[in-house]
Image (spheres, grey):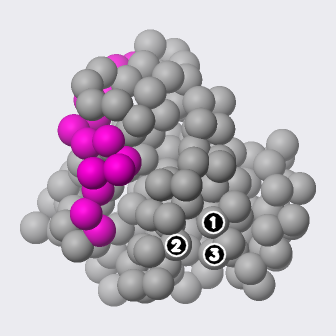
Amino acid sequence: MKKIIFVTAPEEFRDEEYYKPKKVLEEVGIEVITASLKVGELNGKFGYKAMSTFTIQDINLNDFDAIAYIGGNGSNVFFYDPCALKLASNFFKRKKPIASICIASVILANAGILKGRKATVFSDGKEFLIKGGAIYTGSPIEVDENIITANGPEVAEDFGKAIVKAMSN
């Protein structure tokens, strides 16, 4: 069974950016594990509750086939977090699928893995992507090799489908 790790803020993650792609992935038999800055209950912006099994420091990338950074206001806790940035970089080096939705794409830009790649982000993250060397497209979803970026909750289900496709290759 393939496994993906969802890196999710402990507070204020965007509910539908978590549960919609999770449902799409689980429907095709991909196991979704959640990690955060703490183990236990995580609180979405609109009241959705998720459970974190790992802290991001305890993620072993050998145990996962892909990683996804979940958006929402809370994801800014990972923008400069050395562990979150190193995880993105290490998944990138191993050519494993890396996904981010909404403002969480800033994490990938700050990790230095968007240089010269097409990417998208929630509108207020555009300058971060450009500064990180990305080719900002403004598209709802962008796939550039093993990197998937999406711009917000409206495309959360399609984001999940893009991850499934990447994990099937």
Residue 77: image x %, image y %?
A: 59, 36
Q: Relative to residue 160, is residue 79 depicted above or below? A: above
Residue 38 vs residue 92, the one in the foreground: 38
Q: Regarding mark 3 in the picture, which secondary structure is present there?
A: loop
Rendered residue at 82%/56% (across/down): 128
Looking at the rendering, the stretch of residues picked out in magenta corresponds to 48-61
Tags 2 and 1 touching, CB below 8 Å: yes
Instruction: From the image, tell me which residue sits under label 1.
Output: 111
Instruction: Please identify the residue farthest to the top as the structure is shown.
Output: 47
Tags 3 and 1 touching, CB below 8 Å: yes
Count residues near mark 2 (Cα–Cα under 10 Å), then give few for <14, some for 14-19, many for 20+: some
Q: Relative to residue 81, is residue 10 depicted above or below? A: above
Mark 2 vs 1, N-terminal side: 2
Q: Regarding mark 1 in the picture, which secondary structure is present there?
A: loop
Rendered residue at 68%/72% (across/down): 112
Tags 2 and 3 touching, CB below 8 Å: yes
The amino acid pointed to by label 3 is: Ile
- On the question of residue 1 being in view, the answer is yes
Mark 2 vs 3, N-terminal side: 2
Q: Relative to residue 88, is residue 92 depicted above or below? A: below
Residue 89 disc label: 2
The amino acid pointed to by label 1 is: Ala
In-image side of 39 versus 101 (left or right)? left
**Quadrant location, the C terminus:** bottom left
Location of residue 72 (image quadrant): top right
Residue 36: image x %, image y %?
A: 39, 38
Rendered residue at 82%/75% (across/down): 133
Location of residue 105 (image quadrant): bottom right
- On the question of residue 72 being in view, the answer is no
Residue 77 vs residue 160, the one in the foreground: 77
